[in-house]
Image: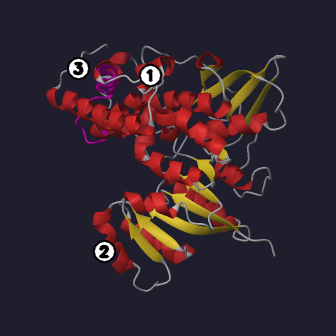
Amino acid sequence: MERKKQIAILGSTGSIGTQALEVISEHSDRYEVYCLTANNKVELLAKQAHQYHPAAIVIANAERRDELVRLMDDMPDVKVYAGARALDEIVEAEPIDMVLTAMVGFAGLSPTIHAIRAHKAIALANKETLVVAGELICRLAIENRAAILPVDSEHSAIFQSLVGEDRNPIDKILLTASGGPFRLKSMDELATVTKADALRHPTWDMGAKITIDSASMMNKGFEVIEAKWLFGVEAQQIQVLVHPQSIVHSAVQFQDGSVKAQLGVPDMRLPIQYAFSYPERLPLSGERLDLFRAQHLDFFEPDMEKFRCLKMAYEAIRRGGNMPCIVNAANEIVNRAFLEDRCGFLQMADVIAETMQRATFIPTPTYDDYVATDAEARRIAAELLLKGKVKSEK
């Protein structure tokens, strides 16, 4: 009998993590959970551990370790760890074949680096890893012969479109975006939208942080940066297309003018499963795309003035160095502030732009520089929010 692939899921209690567990359940003859991790959701993590019987679980918030230990009293065979260092160490465990990085934000960078250095295959759902430190991650992956398989639906679509095209250079990447809930709103309307409005995404069911990033289109900006590193193209070769139906998940144009795309219903289990099974395609339960019912497919250019976060992401790529790290850190601060009603929707872009001006620019950053930059940019963005000293560019 073939050995089951051992999978570590960083962020098992989030949207990607829970859907990954569904995939593992559907193919329990092929995959087995080695480790589950969460930041704060102790009860759900314990429930998952009882269902999937991993070798270990990690709660990143060390203050909740004792609570988790109590919930796991009846499963002494499951090792319980806590803290950021435990995340770095668990991904290096010898039995692990693949690490699904589904943590949110900058926190995913360090454990991903440790997993790559331990020669683990990476199913990458934490886009911030490549946004913050794309050059470093790509170099480490080559040095350690660690495969990076994209899980974002758009990047998985590009990856799938490139299968069999190894010797054919990419002319252009067509990166699709739903446009989020505010695609048709005016600037005046955007000034008064609420977090409840922003969290009502028209096509995808995602966590709160990424849903807000989708509403501001910062998520798409991050995906542009991610695509640059994953597929070795320049920013000017990546064209964002607003596609409200979310049927074409992205496409690649080649030098002969041909375009290959991946289509399907919005279901994150598909790119998760493809990352697990590549190069195989396994059966997957669920709805199928019916092109007879998909009456039309629309594509629009994004409004870069209305959605300034996307424009700033392109600017960050142009500047290079630690600028994408600065943008990511500031965005994490304003995203949380918006969710906590401490920041207006349009103000998020104002704070990010001002942080880009004030933070220390480093053309060729090291890992330690990224850590310092993240801390500095977060401090600047938090101070700007507290003082309200940002120049509005409405």
Considering only order in the chain, which callout, 3 or 1, is on the residue closer to the N terminus? 1
Question: Disc 1 designates what residue?
Answer: 363
Q: Magenta span covers which residues?
A: 339-356
> Looking at this view, is 181 or 107 the one in front?
107
Residue 291, visible in the rendered structure = no
Please provide percent x and percent y for residue 255.
80, 17
| Amino acid type at mark 3 | Val
| Amino acid type at mark 2 | Asp
Predominant secondary structure in magenta? helix
Task: Answer few, some or many: residues within 10 Å of disc 2's Cα (few below 14, many 20 plus, some between 14 and 19).
Answer: few
Q: Residue at x 38, y 62 (%)?
A: 41
In the rendering, which numbered label is found on residue 390? 3
Q: Residue at x 47, y 23 (%)?
A: 313
In the rendering, which numbered label is found on residue 66? 2
Residue 162, visible in the rendered structure = yes
Task: Please determine whether, in this image, residue 154 is positioned above or below residue 41.
Answer: above
Query: How many labels, in total?
Result: 3
Q: In the rendered structure, are the residues bearing label 1 and label 2 in contact, judged by CB atoms less than 8 Å apart?
A: no
Foreground disc of the pair 3, 2: 2
> Looking at this view, is 65 or 391 the one in front?
65
Please provide percent x and percent y for residue 378.
29, 35
Please provide percent x and percent y for residue 369.
39, 34
